Image: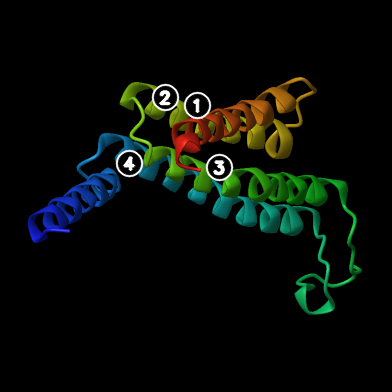
Amino acid sequence: MSSSHMNSSSSSSNSNNNSTMDLLTLENPVFCCYLFWATVLVVKMLLMSLLTALQRFRYKVFPNEEDLFFKNIEVQFDDPRVERVRRAHRNDMENILPYFIMALIYVCTNPNPMIACNLFRLAAIARIVHTLVYAVVAVPQPSRILAFATMLIITFYMAAVVALRTLRFI
């Protein structure tokens, strides 16, 4: 193989690597949108820990002897108000963390910016609504399932796009 052909292959490969890496920079509006809404979701998840603590203090429900701040109360593990917030937080971890990974991979497919950014917005808003109707003010179904399903469908859509765009390489 001639050295000019090797250089041409090498520069073509570098150009593809550079273009993929360019997608993960602040120059890419899709990546910036992903970063913003991912940050919103991380803050939301952190606030769930604080909401759990707030519920524990509000209703004087503590799971450990060393956590008892008030006299004349007993250790308690099953308060429905605290457990509801904990379940909502666990649901976040089960759904938001896979979404983060799939959405980042989706960014690497160079999606249409308008579609991608609207998907990121809708997914984040759906999870915020899910928390509000599950852990803050218990609203009857189908509110919670609609909010849950919104992010789930978006995550599956992104997975399908990635799979279809990469299928030819396997």
Left or right, 32 with respect to 105, comes to left
Observer-nearest residue: 96 or 76?
96
Q: Which mark is residue 122?
A: 1
Q: Position of residue 70 (x, y in %)?
A: 79, 70
User: Of the residues shown, which amino acid type is indicated by label 3?
Assistant: Tyr
Q: Which mark is residue 31?
A: 4
Q: Position of residue 22 (x, y in %)?
A: 23, 46
Observer-nearest residue: 163 or 155?
163
Left or right, 90 with respect to 100, comes to right
* Foreground tag (3 vs 1): 3
N-terminal of the two: label 4 or label 3?
4
N-terminal of the two: label 4 or label 1?
4
Q: Residue visible at 69% across and 37% down?
A: 136
Q: Residue visible at 69% across and 22% down?
A: 146
Left or right, 40 with respect to 146, comes to left
Bin the neighbour count of mark 3 within 10 Å (Cα to Cα): few under 14, some 14-19, many 20 and up.
many
